[in-house]
Image (cartoon, rainbow, N blue to C red):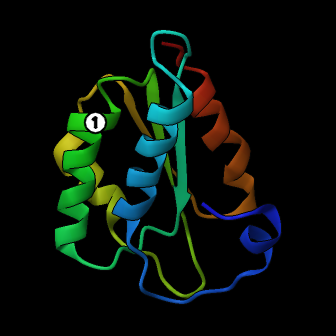
């Protein structure tokens, strides 16, 4: 968790560990947003690059065991990168393709942004 200035100005390359974001999301939800009182919609936009296959497996476990049971929906959008995109969307498709709370989309150009967001909000839970 970082402040607004750091979020918009910090530039890092490589070393992405997606599970750390999922763990932080779980901590924030537990501390501030009970699923008994809130509708919880989680969104993750990424180039799909993750530090390791082991971390991708950890992400699937966190989603299945901790996040999906208490959220209304998890939306993942993989954004094409000029530096090459990772395969996290494929990991989600392999393990969670048929999960009713998981939606995925891809953004390959600016023209895809609206359709991607529409795909997430067009399916209510």
Query: From the viewer's perspective, is residue 75 above or below residue 46?
Result: above
Nearer the observer, 11 or 23:
23
Query: What residue sits 48% from the left and 20% below the top?
Result: 34
Q: In the displayed structure, does residue 72 sit left or right of residue 116?
A: left
Q: Residue furthest front?
A: 31
Quadrant that contains the N terminus:
bottom right
Residue at 59% x, 63% y is 108
Residue tagged 1? 66
Front residue of 72/87: it is 72
Q: Percent x, y for residue 62? A: 26, 46
Left or right: residue 12 compared with residue 18: right
**Percent position of residue 61, x then y:** 19, 47
Q: Residue at x 43, y 77 (%)?
A: 16
Asked whether the viewer can see residue 120, the reply is yes
Q: Position of residue 66 (x, y in %)?
A: 28, 36
Q: How many marks do you count on the picture?
A: 1
Residue 81, compared with residue 22, is above or below; it is below
Asked if 1 appears above or below 119 in the picture, the reply is below
Q: Position of residue 85 (x, y in %)?
A: 45, 76
- Secondary structure at numbered mark 1: helix
Q: Mark yes or no: residue 93 visible.
A: no
Q: Residue at x 32, y 79 (%)?
A: 51
* In the image, residue 110 above or below residue 122: below
Label 1: few (<14), some (14–19) or many (≥20) C-alpha neighbours in 10 Å:
some
């Amino acid at each position: 968790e970082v402040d607004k200035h750091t979020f918009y100005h910090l530039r890092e390359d490589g070393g992405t560990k997606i599970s750390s974001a999922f763990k932080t999301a779980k901590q924030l939800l537990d501390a501030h947003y009970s699923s008994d009182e809130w509708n919880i919609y989680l969104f993750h936009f990424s180039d799909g690059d993750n530090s390791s296959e082991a971390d991708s497996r950890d992400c699937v476990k966190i989603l299945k065991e901790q996040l999906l049971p208490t959220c209304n929906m998890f939306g993942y959008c993989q954004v094409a990168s000029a530096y090459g995109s990772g395969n996290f969307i494929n990991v989600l498709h392999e393990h969670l393709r048929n999960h009713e709370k998981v939606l995925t989309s891809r953004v390959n150009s600016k023209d895809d942004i609206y359709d991607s967001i529409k795909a997430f909000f067009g399916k209510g839970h």
